[in-house]
């Protein structure tokens, strides 16, 4: 999937549907043993850990964005198109697009969780994607290009909600790409 710095609501929702479909397709191709296998002797994330990371980080973004949307007054309808606003947002969004050019270490609170229930990770990811779609739908009438929220993982950064949505999609593309690379490892079971 290509970089997306400006999308209509419908285009954005389609990109989220594509992420969900790609995750389902990926998970359906492999056994649980393959989905939980970690490259480099456990030093890198498994396919399911990539999805878990996405679920956790997306939920954190949605909590912060939802609060900002809830506090905002109805806008003038300018939010029919989501734009990446400003240089920090554009740089951050671009840095997340696959293939990664720079390794970015995930903050501790969004690293994959140790789990005894790997079967629950894909449903959690899908629930997060459904929540993205629901928040987009419920924010109709608000200018998401002007409502700002504090990044829940890097509090010094503030983004527009529209940028936040675009960041979620770019981040999803990055880690689905990463998950695909796990299956290409020479030792992949």
Image (tube, rainbow, N blue to C red):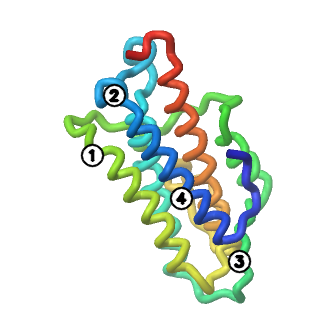
Q: Which residue is labeled 1 in the image? A: 120
Q: Earlier in the sequence, mark 2 or mark 4?
A: 4
Q: Can residue 152 be seen in this view?
A: yes
Depth order, front residue of 150/90: 90
Choose top left, top right, bottom left or bottom right for residue 10: bottom right
Asked if the residues shown at circle 2 and circle 4 are in contact, with their CB atoms under 8 angstroms apart, the answer is no
Q: Is residue 63 visible?
A: no
10 Å neighbourhood of mark 1: few (<14), some, or many (≥20)?
few
User: What is the residue that sits farthest to the front in this orientation?
Assistant: 29
Depth order, front residue of 145/98: 98
Q: Which residue is labeled 3 in the image? A: 80
Measured from the top left, where is residue 28 in percent x and y? 39, 39
* Direction from residue 70 to residue 49 in the image, left or right: left
Q: Distance between the residues labelled 4 and 3?
A: 18 Å
Asked if the residues shown at circle 1 and circle 2 are in contact, with their CB atoms under 8 angstroms apart, the answer is no
Q: Which residue is labeled 4 in the image? A: 17
Q: Earlier in the sequence, mark 1 or mark 2?
A: 2
Report helix, strand or loop for mark 1: helix
Report helix, strand or loop for mark 4: helix
**For residue 36, which numbered disc appears in the image?**
2
């Amino acid at each position: 999937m290509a970089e997306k710095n400006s999308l209509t609501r419908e285009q954005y929702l389609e990109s989220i549907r594509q992420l969900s479909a790609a995750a389902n397709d990926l998970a359906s191709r492999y056994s649980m043993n393959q989905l939980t296998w970690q490259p480099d002797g456990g030093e890198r994330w498994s396919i399911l850990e990539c999805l878990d990371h996405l679920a956790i980080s997306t939920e954190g973004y949605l909590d912060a964005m939802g609060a900002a949307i809830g506090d905002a007054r109805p806008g003038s309808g300018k939010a029919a198109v989501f734009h990446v606003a400003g240089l920090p947002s554009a740089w951050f969004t671009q840095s997340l697009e696959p293939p990664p050019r720079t390794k970015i270490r995930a903050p501790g609170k969004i690293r994959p969780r140790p789990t005894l229930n790997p079967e629950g990770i894909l449903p959690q990811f899908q629930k997060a994607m459904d929540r993205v779609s629901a928040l987009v739908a419920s924010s109709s009438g608000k200018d998401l290009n002007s409502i700002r929220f504090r990044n829940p993982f890097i509090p010094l950064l503030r983004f527009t909600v529209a940028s936040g949505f675009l960041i979620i999609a770019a981040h999803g593309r990055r880690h689905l790409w990463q998950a695909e690379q796990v299956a290409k490892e020479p030792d992949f079971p």
